[in-house]
Image (cartoon, grey):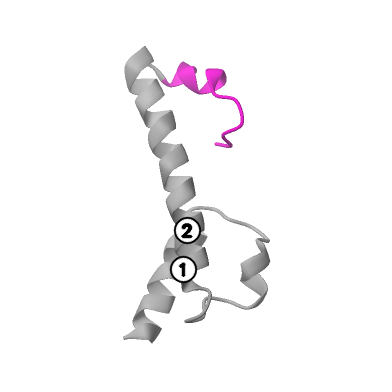
Amino acid sequence: MINVLRVGVKSIYDRMGFKDELLVEHGVTESNMMQYLGIIEQRTIEILKMYELCETKGSFDALDDIKGIPP
């Protein structure tokens, strides 16, 4: 079961576009899986904030107004 979780977490991490993070050199392990999930959670929150701002302003031009949140 842990192996299935490791593969799934790594897949989500990769699809979110993370590059050269510190954790990558060791891969997803049972001991660092929570760190990977924390990074994924933080990025998900950032994406949801961008989406909310776009919905509020009615366009994706609102992304120009966001400071400190990478696309």
Query: Where residue 52 sits in the image (x, y, percent)?
Result: 35, 27
> Looking at the picture, how far across and down is residue 14, in whole percent?
51, 61
Q: CA distance from mark 1 to mark 2?
A: 6 Å
The local crowd at label 2, few if under 14, some if 14 to 19, many if 20 or more residues have their Cα within 10 Å, is few
Q: Amino acid at mark 1?
A: Met
Reply yes or no: does residue 69 show up in magenta: yes
Which residue is pictured at 42% across the width and 61% down the height?
12
Question: Percent x, y for residue 11?
Answer: 44, 67
Left or right of residue 19, residue 33 in this image: left
- Report whether residue 49 is seen: yes
Reading the image, the residue beneath label 2 is 38
In the depicted structure, whether residue 40 falls above or below residue 45 = below
| Residue 60, above or below 17 | above
**Left or right of 24 in this view: 5:** left
What residue did someone put label 1 on? 34
Quadrant location of the C terminus in the rendered image: top right
- Circles 1 and 2, Cβ within 8 Å, touching? The answer is yes
Label annotation for residue 12:
none
Q: Nearer the viewer, residue 15 or 30?
A: 30
Query: Seen from this angle, which residue lies furthest top?
Result: 57
Q: Secondary structure at mark 2?
A: helix
Characterize the local packing of mark 1: few (<14), some (14-19) or many (20 or more) Cα atoms within 10 angstroms. Answer: few
Which span is picked out in magenta? 60-71
Image quadrant containing the N terminus: bottom left
Q: Residue type at mark 2?
A: Gly
